[in-house]
Amino acid sequence: MWQEVLNMLFPKKCINCEIIIPSSQLYLCEVCKTKLPFTGIILNNENYLYEKLNLITKIESASALLNFTKNNITQKLIHHLKYKNMPELGEWLAEIWFQNNKDNPFLKKIETVIPVPIHPKRLKNRNYNQLTLCGKRLADLLNCEYDEYTLKRIYHLKSQTQSGKYERLERMKNTFQRTNSKKSHFLLVDDVFTTGSTLIYCTEELLKIKTSQVSIFTLAVAN
């Protein structure tokens, strides 16, 4: 009864178009779900995301789920994931990505899922890493290890959304640090690929152990 009252007072709304949706519905109305801007970039080494990153650092494969543009559905989903205390959105997107890749032989090579870490200061302010639940769900689906300790962020930087590619690359130097000598094929998970600077320096740290390998998955890629 109380749940029914709460649903009446605070009805659930679609993150994109804001129409009221059933309490059992997840995040988007049925119409907006059909409009999700999928990239079609499955996990492999024959796509532009892989080629772009592999020019600078050595990765095994790469994938991105959604296209990110100003004010599109993806931007709204990522905003709620990061700033509206909805980390469970990451689980939902992880499941969608897995379903799109479940028969992909590249998945069988993954041994450890590792999220891009956030600085303790930002973690304290936000109370969660937006990628934790996403990474844990991926590890469950892939039947592999989840690891949030091998890589840590040692410098806190302000938002880089207004920075250019080369400025970002320069500012991100020495931001991440490996904490152990673990060997694995890591699936490095991030929210949005823009210039790739975060992923590049995380990968460089992970590859300091020579027998390690890194593949990349991002929830979105900016156009």
Image (cartoon, rainbow, N blue to C red):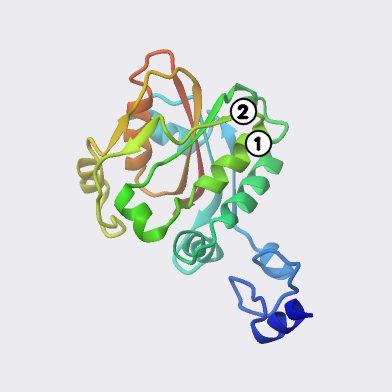
Q: Nearer the viewer, residue 40 or 113?
A: 113
Q: Nearer the viewer, residue 155 or 194?
A: 155
Q: Does 83 sit left or right of 98 as displayed?
A: left
* Residue 144: mark in rendering: 2
Q: Kindly identify which residue carries mark 1.
A: 140
Q: Residue at 64% x, 24% y: name it.
A: 108
Query: Tag 1, which secondary structure?
Result: helix
Image position, residue 195 (x, y; %): 34, 46
Which amino acid type is marked by label 2?
Cys
Say if residue 57 shows up in the picture.
no
Q: Compared with residue 25, is residue 191 higher up or lower down, i.e. above or below?
A: above
The quadrant of the picture occupied by the C terminus is bottom left
Identity of the residue furthest to the front in this view: 2
Give me the C-alpha separation between circle 1 and circle 2.
Answer: 7 Å
Which amino acid type is marked by label 1?
Asp
Image position, residue 74 (x, y; %): 53, 60
Image position, residue 1 (x, y; %): 79, 80
Q: Does 167 sit left or right of 153 as displayed?
A: left
Q: Residue at 37% x, 53% y: name it.
A: 123
* Residue 217: mark in rendering: none
Query: Tag 2, which secondary structure?
Result: loop
Q: Residue at 27% x, 60% y: name it.
A: 162
Image position, residue 21 (x, y; %): 72, 75
Pointers 1 and 2 in contact (CB under 8 A)?
A: no
Q: Does 125 sit left or right of 70 as displayed?
A: left
Mark 2 surroundings: few (<14), some (14-19) or many (≥20) residues within 10 A: some
Mark 1 surroundings: few (<14), some (14-19) or many (≥20) residues within 10 A: few
Identity of the residue furthest to the bottom in this view: 9
Q: Nearer the viewer, residue 170 or 136?
A: 136
Identity of the residue furthest to the top in this view: 211
Say if residue 157 shows up in the picture.
yes
